[in-house]
Amino acid sequence: MATRIRIFLDTSVIFAGIWSAKGGGRMLLRLGEAGAISLVMSRLAIQELEGAPRNKAPQSLGALALLLDRSDITVVGEPSATNRSDARSFDDHPANAEILASAMGSDIEYFVTLDRKHFLENEKLPLAVAFKIGTPAECLEWIRRRLRRMAGGRT
């Protein structure tokens, strides 16, 4: 069996997937649930996800836990000191740098985010990392093209 594509999700994508039943974030969660792709997140992203509902809607924590479990998300451990240092050179915001550092050490193929300021519009970042960076819609298109190539079809 072929290895599944590993996709790292930023917190913003999970929030979008929770609040929109039809968007790209939700589709990525569904693909994870179906076992078509392997979804990855950092511990910090999980803490950020739990923080908002815990303060504003604690009754929704169970639904959040169920969604994460069904999507078969792998939570990666702490990033290395080297990855932390490298990530800080691209973003001095501590939480963003920590999430990026986790992605750098996670053997992923795609980092999915909705954060334009810190990730999507950072021109130096894509040149320095071994994975693609984009929005949920861009990632879904990349997956579609990749699957077509694997099946011997046109791109």
Image: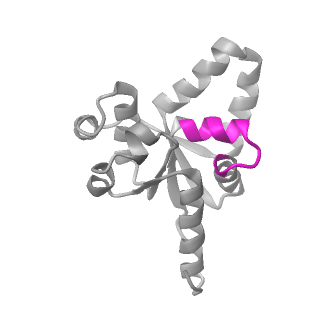
Q: Which residues are magenta?
A: 12-25
Image-quadrant location for residue 53: top right
x, y percent for residue 6: 50, 56
Q: For the point 34% across and 26% down, which residue is it? A: 94
- Compared to residue 53, the image places residue 73 above or below, namely below
x, y percent for residue 123: 31, 51
Q: For the point 60% across and 23% down, which residue is it? A: 50
- Compared to residue 77, the image places residue 140 above or below, namely below
Q: For the point 58% across and 52% down, which residue is it? A: 136
Q: Is 21 in the magenta?
A: yes
Please identify the dominant SS of the magenta region.
Answer: helix
Q: Is 110 in the magenta?
A: no
x, y percent for residue 75: 51, 39
* Residue 105 at least partly seen: no
Seen as rendered, the residue at the extreme top is 55
Image-quadrant location for residue 17: top right
- Compared to residue 95, the image places residue 136 above or below, namely below
Q: Is residue 24 left or right of residue 79?
A: right
Quadrant for the N terminus in the image: bottom right
Question: What colour scheme does the image use?
Answer: one colour
Front residue (pair 43, 48): 48
Q: For the point 53% across and 51% down, which residue is it? A: 135
Front residue (pair 103, 12): 12
Count every numbered label the image shows and give the total: 0
Quadrant for the C terminus in the image: bottom right
* Residue 152 at least partly seen: yes
- Compared to residue 147, the image places residue 74 above or below, namely above
